[in-house]
Amino acid sequence: MAGRSSRPARLAAAALLAVAVAGSAAAISLSSAPAPSPGRAEKLSTLVLDRDGRLLRPFTAVDGAWRLPAAKDKVDPRFLRFLTTYEDKRFFSHPGVDPLAALRAVGQAALHRGVVSGGSTLTMQVARLLAPDARDRTLARKWREMGAALALERAVGKDGVLDLYLRLAPYGGNLEGVRAASLAYFGKEPGRLSIAEAALLVAIPQAPEARRPDRDVAAAKAARDHVLDRLVAAGALAAAEAAYAREEPVPTGRRAFPNLAAHAAEAAARRVGSGGVARLTLKRDLQRALEDLARERARSLGPGLSVAILVADHRTGAIEASVGSADYFDASRAGSLDQTRAVRSPGSALKPFIYGLAFENGVAAPETLIEDRPARFGAYAPRNFDEGFHGTVSCAQALALSLNIPAVALLEAVGPTRFVARLRGAGAQVSLPGVEAPGLAVALGGLGVRLVDLATLYAGLARGGATTPLADDPAALSDPAAPGRRLMDPIAAAQVSAALLKSPPPQAALGGRIAFKTGTSYGYRDAWAVGFDGEHVVAVWAGRPDGASSAGLVGRDAAAPILFDAFARLGRDVAPAPPPPAGAVTAAADLPAALKRFRPLESASAGSAAEAAPLAVAFPPDGARVEMGAGAELTLKASGGVAPFRWLVDGRPLPPQRRRDATWTVSGPGFARVTVTDGAGATASASVRLD
């Protein structure tokens, strides 16, 4: 009997030994499995963010999926709690495989001779998402998933597994990951979700195509409510909260992904490449507000018309809003074209820089009297926009009123070629028709310029006469302490800015707060308005993208109101401009006789002027380097020209002199520009370095 009973015992021991050997072999097999390759988890959507890291515009990944990076610290904690409770309640305690769930699955499979319940952990689901297997559900496949899950947790840990799930979980169609799903179904980031929204995002990945709310609202709601029931049963959610969540409607379709700053975002996406992340200097809320403004105003202007707006901090050069068109998706307004980079005729928008060059070189001053009367400049006979004339006005008044005759006369005095060279030297991309040299028509828009170039030039005015490149890429910004490119000297910049503060504001707007200028191109093709305060420069363009004429399209009526509205949407009071530099002439009584009235070139050729040698600065010669300390007196000498002579240093007038020489007290080391004008209105300048 004892012999007979020993046989079953030996069989049981052998069975136990076989199980132990098999279990050991299984453990060795699972523990040696390699971690799955990252695969498409690394093929992410390209993202363009604002300065604070908020999403402006995403782009699909290279395989066409919306697959946005997501991390657990950026997702509503309730969603994570619901997810682990519903999908894998022992997620934080198992090594990637839940032994209890696995035994249950194996037992059911043995009983039913096939896989009944997967027993999959979240880690196993992620392993399956990383390495999709199209074969049927078999124990062999489940075995591979278990090995991959153990290896995955060893490689990335619990947080890494959660991040991968949040990035890869399927939500129907080409939506992958909780962030893409939240944006598509709820129109918001997943950082703050309602209970109903969180439950729906837990439910969909179980059967993403069947439970897509944009295809089957009833199925989506049933799946969401089932999740809510399970959460209540597990003690993860109060019954009253679940009941309230069931009353929340399920979304019935997909929303459009954010598409702010579409043109700037496309350029940024090209810079960073597929799957990259670009952070711009733009402000998302301001960008949205100005896109709404552009859309509203374009519709009120009429069919086919568009609006572009650019806002930059002129102290740093950082672009804070870039609206390239009234509506990116409106083909009737050519919305896909970026009008901030289109070359157009600026009309009168460049006049301030003519006056600045004239003030800097001693040709005129703000209080210099100038004639606004019919005049011919060779074959060129410009007229004012209103076809009228104002007679004798000061240069400051002529600029504020945007009179054409005075601007052309001053441009003739400073020289069109020199004027265009100064604009280009300051960083503006100026386009001239054909290969001809610049003519006097450039004063009234006879060249091409971009909205971003105008903003750059006006930002230079606000910065005291030195420009810095405007950019929406933080890496492209210049050091704010750098001197910048020379546009005009600080005194001339302050004088021009003061004149622009007196520009008549649009109807119902307050004047004297924003220094601005408008422009209207020939044939009513382009309307412009550009202005600045102590912090920002704003540039506005309105017109037809195809360059066609639009009757009545005038800068003061079409663009200036948009400019003032854009300043109002900056979300702060107008910032005051800095005070003018010391030495700036502010009253007519301070002017020397030669600057009290501007004399055009054609009337300055009488008497001895016809026989005089050309005016020049004899000392110091242009480009000279002089060793003189602060307080030392430097003698300035002129040659040629006709008395009386007027000397200026960096735009500051020295005491009137009839002689060819003058004395200047050096203020300290650095660069200085010495200018002399004569009684015939001729001007000569020289730059000198003082050590």
Image (cartoon, rainbow, N blue to C red):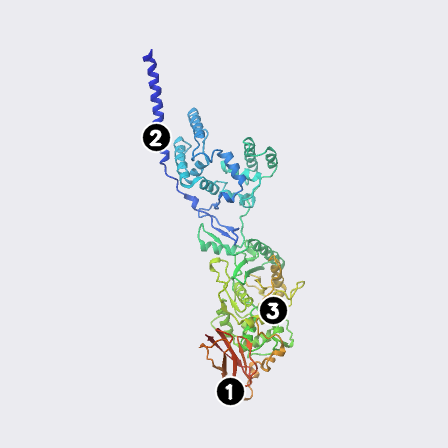
Tell me the quadrant of the picture where the N terminus can be found.
top left
For the residues labelled 3 and 2, the Cα–Cα distance comes to: 86 Å
337, above or below 665, in the image: above
Q: Is 251 situated above or below 46?
A: above
Is label 1 in a helix, a strand or a loop? loop
How far from the left and from the top, in percent, is residue 310? Answer: 55, 60
- Mark 1 Cα-neighbour bin, 10 Å: few <14, some 14–19, many ≥20: few
Give the residue type that dot 3 points to.
Answer: Leu
Residue at the disc numbered 1: 612
Q: Secondary structure at mark 2?
A: helix
Circle 3 residues within 10 Å: few <14, some 14–19, many ≥20: many
At a point 44% along the width and 48% down the height, the residue shown is: 62
Name the image quarter holding residue 39: top left
Q: Are marks 1 and 3 in contact (CB under 8 Å)?
A: no
Q: Quadrant of the C terminus?
A: bottom left
Instruction: Choose top left, top right, bottom left or bottom right for residue 106.
Output: top left
| Contact (Cβ within 8 Å) of mark 3 with mark 2 | no
- Mark in the foreground, 1 or 2: 2
Looking at this rendering, what residue extends furthest in the top direction?
Answer: 1
Query: Which residue sits furthest right?
Result: 508
